[in-house]
Image (spheres, rainbow, N blue to C red):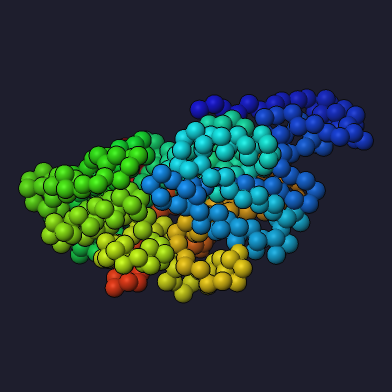
Amino acid sequence: MSRPVRALAAAAAALALVSACNSATPKADGPGGIGEGGGAVTRGVSADSIKVGGIVSMTSAAGYSKKDTDLGAKARYMRANAEGGVNGRRIDYIGAEDDGQDPGKNLAAARKLVQQDKVFAVAPMSSVTFTGADFLEQEKVPTFGWGTLPSFCGPRYIYGFNGCLVPSPGGTLNQTWPEGIAQVLGGAAGKSVAIIANDSDAGKFGIRTFEQGFTSAGFKVSYAKASVPATAVPSDWSPYVKELLAGTDGKAPDAVVSVMQTPNNIGLFTALKRGGYKGVLTDPTDYDPGLLAKEATKQALDGVHVLLQFEPFESNDPKMTRFKADIKAASGGQDVPLNMHMLTGYMSADLFLSIAQKAGKDLTLAHFQNAAQSFSDTDTLVGDRAEPKGQKDSFGCGALVQLKNGTYEVSVPFKCHEPIPFK
């Protein structure tokens, strides 16, 4: 990954430049639109606005959509503007580009936002592919999203709204999921889990991280494979069910952990239930009341424990009440079903806004990055936040909810766990 180049100038030259350009239109010198002089133009920042865009998988070949991520971001920016903006500047949110979960389109969307729309930041970025990461880092574009991809862990300008969830060796792993499932099962001692993911880079990395996490929590991992095709949902799940239930010793695992999206989970969980499996089913994606509209979907996901890395919607926390009010306002006053994609967009925008506020009235890329280097706050919908810690480690908080009789119930309350070293 390319490293940003910092322009250096002598103090005398800078003063001369400021004096010479005092009555002229300044130019943006760097790839990020940041000039060397005090009057230089910052890409996407004017006297009264900050331009922000997003990249979201509105559509996909499998029919899965994260479109409500865009609504969540819009809701947070609307409230910011209603409260006077960020240090007097309103947020000009131009909406999100649809990458269709296609790597080529993801990069194209990043290029468009920077080169044509000239945004200051990308918030949110929500997709299972992030081929635009290198370009955004090279162009020094602050980018915010769900840190479930390696690109959110390490780069200087890319931030996960709840930290880095797929770290490199030397980082840490969030233990919410293993500790939560241990609580559901009454302890991890003597219990086994089977972990399954899509055959993709993200899926393989997920297997690696969660296998270590569940093992560290005291579970025996009887199966851990990224074996499901990433491009299409299987029509026959029986081979996968047979492997999962056989484990390593012929005994069915106490829990099946799916690191996949909704269409795959519906197929897998339905097949497991038809095969007589009675253990715990769990995944990190199916917290969406909209899924309950279809009877078949509701039955397939009934009993499933879903990992959350934020306060559940069922919480009475005042911050959740405010989130719901913001979503309603952004929806034109309608009561729309809430889902985790909305929260992803909302909290991506929230972290960007919080750092921008700390950067002060003179918003430049340098000032934004300096603010991020010492940023921290507490008691948010994703727990306590800190940067640059979040570019290496998870914030360590989360909860589990269970779909039960057509409604979601909190099965493990929101809590922060001590992360473990990733090896």
In x, y percent, where is residue 239? 16, 44
Say above or below: 144 vs 31: below
What's the residue at 60%, 34% (across, down)?
111
Quick check: 112 left or right of 198?
right
In this rendered view, identify the residue nearer to me: 355 or 54. 54
What's the residue at 24%, 56% (across, down)?
269
In x, y percent, where is residue 379? 51, 63
Furthest residue in direction left, as rendered: 250
Say above or below: 139 vs 326: above
Image quadrant containing the C terminus: top left
Q: How many marks?
A: 0
Furthest residue in direction right, as rendered: 23
What's the residue at 71%, 25% (across, down)?
8
The answer, for residue 263, to whether it is visible in the render is yes
In this rendered view, identify the residue nearer to me: 103 or 157. 103
What's the residue at 22%, 42% (across, down)?
224
In x, y percent, where is residue 334? 56, 71
In this rendered view, identify the residue nearer to me: 295 or 202. 295
In this rendered view, identify the residue nearer to me: 250 or 260. 260
Quick check: 52 left or right of 134?
right
In x, y percent, where is residue 77? 64, 58
The answer, for residue 153, to whether it is visible in the render is no
The answer to which image quadrant residue 5 occupies is: top right
Quick check: 165 left or right of 158?
left
Say above or below: 36 vs 271: above
